[in-house]
Image: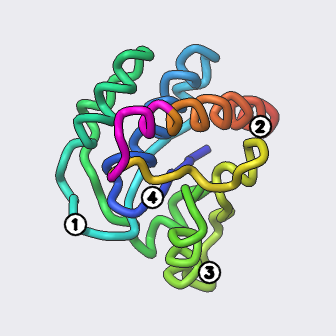
Amino acid sequence: MRVLFVCLGNICRSPTAEGVLRHKLREAGLAAQVQVASAGTGDWHVGNAPDKRSQAAALLRGYDLSAQRAQQVSRADFADYDLILAMDHSNLRNLKALQPAQGRAELDLFLRRYASSVDEVPDPYYDAEQGFEQVLDLIEHACDLLVIEVKGRL
């Protein structure tokens, strides 16, 4: 199974989701069966490491994001991934516009599919440190539910 998380620049939300899911899949003994990546709909940060604030907040909870590098979503991703999960409505619209007719990937909002009363992961880029903590809270909960789905699919 292959999962791709998508946000705007691929430096805050989607790399955090990638790191959290990778960690939770290792803990569940599923890391070898599931490939996880992240990308952005924009190209501003391609090649850059995740935002230092995202990395710091994640590291405090045991998730190391330092090896990740931002990349941009491509049309090929819709054939390469089984599940493409957008962090918000804007990025979901951008993905739908990019999605080729023959793309096989399931496309959805990450939190609508795996969360609670909110359906978007807020962008913490212009927020204070607590914004990054809130993002982690939402992503951790949703990744727990995603791991359950992955177990059922495998």
Report the front residue among 22 and 35: 22
> Magenta residues: mostly which secondary structure?
helix
Residue carrying label 2:
149
Marks 1 and 4, how far apart in space? 12 Å
Q: Position of residue 73 (x, y in %)?
A: 40, 66
Which of marks 4 and 2 precedes in the sequence? Answer: 4
Which circle marks residue 7 in the picture?
4
Marks 3 and 1, how far apart in space? 28 Å
- Which amino acid does the dot numbered 4 rest on? Cys
Identify the residue shown where x is 77% and y is 39%: 153
Q: How many numbered callouts?
A: 4
Q: Position of residue 28 (x, y in %)?
A: 64, 17
Residue carrying label 3:
102
Callouts 2 and 3 close, C-beta under 8 Å: no
Instruction: Find the magenta span and give its range.
Output: 126-133
Marks 2 and 1, how far apart in space? 33 Å
Residue carrying label 1:
44
Vertical placement of residue 63 versus 36, above or below: above
* SS at mark 4 in the image: strand
From the viewer's perspective, tell me whether residue 72 is left or right of residue 131: left
